[in-house]
Image (cartoon, rainbow, N blue to C red):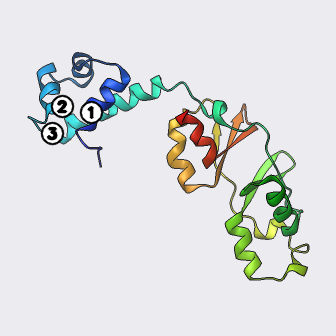
Amino acid sequence: MLPRLDNIKQQRTKLGITQKELARMTGVSTSMINQIESGRSQPSYETAKRMFDSLATLEGRADPNKAGDICSKEIVKLKPTDSLHDAITKMQKMSISQIPIFNKTEPVGIITEDGVVKHLADSDESSWKKIRLADVMEARPPIVDQQTPAKTLVPLIRYSKCILVAKAGKIVGIITASDTLKMLE
């Protein structure tokens, strides 16, 4: 599904390109771009898609922010052998809602507030110190390269509690939903 046609002019002007430049990029006439933007003409699906694809490509180039720019460099970590109690204590102390779990330098999972709540309902407080994170952790969060354009991370963060950022295969940062707000600054 494509965005609404009335977004074309807004995106084009935000990127600072002329109707003529957009026309050249999409293979249509400048007058066609003018007619589409003014609502006097409806482009074919293929033409509209080329226009939005061209604008998206330019927007990616125009966005200087990369994953490495917006990530938090200090990563709070836990080990698979740590307890559920350790996770609860660290989350409360640090005021965070998720913590990646590392086996030495390798990320192996994540524990989140939601995951903790599920396990609290199934156990009593005395067992929290006995429950190992290896037994209750969720799947490892996605890992992206530090050069990944920041805007491409927004859809990913909607489905994942956090994203780990790597440089040359080594984890160097973490991005949470609150970090994506930095892109709005």
Q: Which residue is mark 1?
A: 8
Q: Secondary structure at mark 1?
A: helix
Residue drawn where x is 30% and y is 31% of the image: 10
| Front residue (pair 150, 146) | 150
Q: Which residue is mark 3?
A: 44
Mark earlier in primary sequence (2, 1) = 1
Question: How many labels were placed on the picture?
Answer: 3
Residue drawn where x is 8% and y is 34% of the image: 40
Residue 42 is tagged as: none
Residue drawn where x is 59% and y is 30% of the image: 66
Give the amino acid at mark 1: Ile
* Residue 5 pos. (x, y %): 22, 39
Residue drawn where x is 15% and y is 39% of the image: 44
Quarter of the image where one finds residue 105: top right
Q: Secondary structure at mark 2?
A: helix
| Front residue (pair 41, 109) | 41
Give the amino acid at mark 2: Glu
Mark earlier in primary sequence (3, 2) = 2
* Residue 73 pos. (x, y %): 76, 36
Q: Image height check: is 56 above or below 17?
A: below
Residue 37 is tagged as: 2
